[in-house]
Structure formats: C-alpha cells, structure tokens
Amino acid sequence: MDNFKNSYIVVEKELVSLSVSNVGHEKCHPGYQWGPGVRDHYLIHYVAKGKGRYEVNGQWVELSAGDCFLVYPKSIVTYQADEKDPWEYAWVGFTGSDAKLILQATDFSQESPYLKDLSYGQEVYEKLLSIYEVRGNDFRNQVQMTGRLYEFFALLMENAKRKNEGDQTAAYIQKSVDFITANYSSSIKVQDIADFVGLSRSQLFRVFMQGLGISPKDYLSDYRIRQAKHMLKQTEYPVQTIANSVGFENSLYFSKAFHTKCGCSPREYRNKKGAKS
C-alpha cells in the first residue's frame, strides 16, 4: 500500500474544557521518525497496522498493531516506524482543563504512557476516525469533534483495568464544573463553588490543582472569557452586555481580564475575527 497522510489542524479552539487540536490518519514510510521533540498538547496514537517504536522516559518501547501510545505536553519523545513493516496509525491531539482529569480515569500514566494489545482496539480506531470525519473550524464542527472525543475517552475509561485513585477528586471537580457551567453568568465567586461542593476554599484549591493543574479562580475566569469570545464572534451585542452576560459586573474589569488572557481588548478581538461590531 502507498504511504499516505490525512491530517487536520484546528485553528480556532472555542471549548475551554476540552478541544481537539489536530486529528489524522497516516501510513508511514519505512523508518519515518518524529522527534526527539516536545508537543504543546496531549497526543494519542492508535497503531492499526505494522510496527514501530516509541522513546519515552529515556526508554524505547516496541509497539505494533493493537497498541496505543500517549504523548504528554512538554515531554521529550521520539517515535519511529519500523523499516520493514512500517506502522499505520490514527491520532488525535487535544487540550483543555478537563484533559488531565479525564486521562487519570484511563490506564494511561506518565510512568507508563502506552497501552498494549487492546482487545477493543478496533473500536478505538473507529472512534478516532469518526473525529476526523467531522473536522472543521466552525463552532459546530468543534462541538462535534469534542463530542466524539468524549466518546473516545468514555471507551478508554470503560475498559480501564487499574483503580482510579482520583475518584473523589474527580467527583469534586465535576460537581464544581457543573456548578460553574450553570451559574457562570451570575456573579459567583470561588467561595460559592466551595460552598456548593462542601469544601473550604483551600481544599477546593488543592483539588483543582491536583486534578486539573489550574486554580478554581483561573478555571472560572477562563470559562467566562471563552464564552465571551464566542459571543463576540457570533453576536452583535455591545461589550457591556457581553460582560454582564458572562458574569462580569464591571466592563472595565472584563476588558482588563480579557486583555490579560487574549492579548487584545474585546473590541479588537471582535474586529480581528471579522465579527460584526
């Protein structure tokens, strides 16, 4: 079979909790190698055919059809197709505040970032291809890709063999995220979130840092800014209206927070993105 590569890179990532960065499917040529290098996002490959090897944590791991490997952000990795039987794989790259928490509920870990001889490998492969099928940069495409990415993770979680030690942490975070999603447009504070889940502020902070690597205050702010970006692109509402709609009572504070996060003012973002003013 001839070598091929079908790849799609997402330019706009609208969803703060989980977003697809890139997705694709490739039949590598013999000896093809990526790295050593680092990624700025998570990246999962599933080997559909052939063989190859993956260097992580200073060790080479031999992989073949039915195996799956994960690249963590900012980790130095190398992966290389076999010279005689080069691998064919599908992959998905992703980012978002939920990514770390979700991966903790699978059999992946930084000490062992690969899964071998998956009995449900064909389902994994089909889930990855289904994400590619709905590729696109429209908000609708991003929702579809993210929805199918969640289905992919649900499959990995359902088949996980190790006990998830972070179950309680995950439960607190999910309850917090649900509260934020339902109430971000109101003037809720971190204390409101802590009260809702039954933790102190300091306990909630530790839970978020352990599970997501981000504070609850930053998570709430990021969520509000992401919703504001969508409204700036998709509506003609004045900035003050948008600020109020995403939970900022003061438009000046909203503009400052937006600039800190995005590097430009809300109006500049709207004009740059070609949205109507």
Image (cartoon, rainbow, N blue to C red):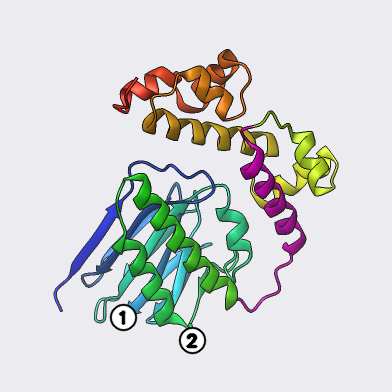
Residue plotted at (61% across, 16% down): 250
> Percent position (x, y) of residue 12?
36, 41
> Percent position (x, y) of residue 172?
75, 53
> Percent position (x, y) of residue 275?
32, 27
Q: Is residue 210 left or right of residue 181?
A: right
Q: Is residue 107 left or right of residue 120?
A: right
Q: Residues within 10 Å of mark 2 (few under 14, many from 20)?
A: few
Q: Which residues are magenta?
A: 160-185
Q: Disc 1 marks which residue?
A: 49
Q: Which quadrant would the N terminus be assigned to in this image? A: bottom left
User: Closer to the N terminus: mark 1 or mark 2?
Assistant: 1
Q: Does the image show residue 12?
A: yes
> The residue under label 1 is which amino acid type?
Lys
Residue pushed farthest left?
Answer: 2
In this rendering, is residue 26 above or below 276?
A: below
| Disc assigned to residue 119 | 2
Q: CA distance from mark 1 to mark 2?
A: 15 Å
> Percent position (x, y) of residue 211?
68, 52
Residue plotted at (43% across, 81% down): 121
Res 106 → quadrant: bottom right
Say which of 66 and 55 sits in front: 66
